[in-house]
Image (tube, helix red, strand yellow):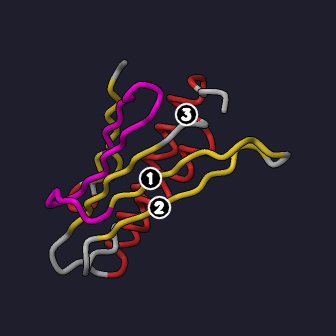
Amino acid sequence: MPSYRISCGSGKAEVKLKANYMGQDLVVRITAGKAHIGAVALAVPCPQTAEGVIASCSVMTVPGHRDNIPAESTAMKLCKVLGCVVNVTAGLHIDNATKSEIEELVDNSNKATEILIKQLEGLKNGF
């Protein structure tokens, strides 16, 4: 299976997303600045309902980190669209980040996720 590499933003707020399949499941890594593991999210699809695929997500966050926000958001979006198990590891860091820099990181993470969704939509697993 191919690997996917996406970059959004520039400078300190550049977010890099890497993804690849592990069997039918998807593994995603999101980094910015000093790469690290700040949070891990695992989203699992539930049977399809009238609203489409729904998902359940478990998140573990390293104390003092807020990477759970992009990790969970990305895992849930991808799981619902693709209908497969999705593991997201996120580590986004800018030294002494301002509120606007943090917002820019989150925005770039969301943009990278949307680009990946467009690339993978045709590969749904049919849960």
**Label 3 Cα crowd, 10 Å radius (few <14 / some 14-19 / many 20+):** few
Q: Earlier in the sequence, mark 3 or mark 1?
A: 1
- Distance Cα–Cα, label 2 vs label 1: 5 Å
Which amino acid type corresponds to the residue marked 1 in the rendered image?
Answer: Leu
Task: Based on the picture, tell me whether residue 27 belongs to the magenta stretch.
Answer: yes
Q: Given the image, on which type of amino acid does mark 2 rest?
A: Ser
Upstream in the sequence, badge 2 or badge 1? 1
Report the Cα–Cα distance between label 3 and label 1: 21 Å
Reading the image, the residue beneath label 1 is 42
Q: Percent position (x, y) of residue 84?
A: 54, 36
Sequence-first disc among 3 and 2: 2
For the residues carrying marks 3 and 1, which lies nearer the camera in this image? 1
Mark 2 lies on residue: 58
Q: Secondary structure at mark 3?
A: helix
Quarter-of-image position of residue 68: bottom left
> What's the magenta region?
17-39
* Left or right for 11, reference 80: left
In this view, the residue farthest toward the front is 47
The residue drawn where x is 37% and y is 18% is 1
Residue contact at pointers 2 and 1, CB within 8 angstroms? yes
Can you identify the residue that label 3 sits on? 118
Q: In this orientation, which residue lies closer to the viewer: 30 or 72?
A: 72
For label 1, the SS is: strand
Q: Residue at x 36, y 43 (%)?
A: 28
Q: Amino acid at mark 3?
A: Lys
Query: Residue 25: x and y, percent?
Result: 45, 33
Of labels 3 and 2, the one closer to you = 2
Q: Position of residue 41 (x, y in %)?
A: 41, 57
Specify the quadrant of the image occupied by residue 65.
bottom left
Helix, strand, or loop for circle 2? Answer: strand
Q: Give percent across and percent down for residue 52.
A: 76, 43
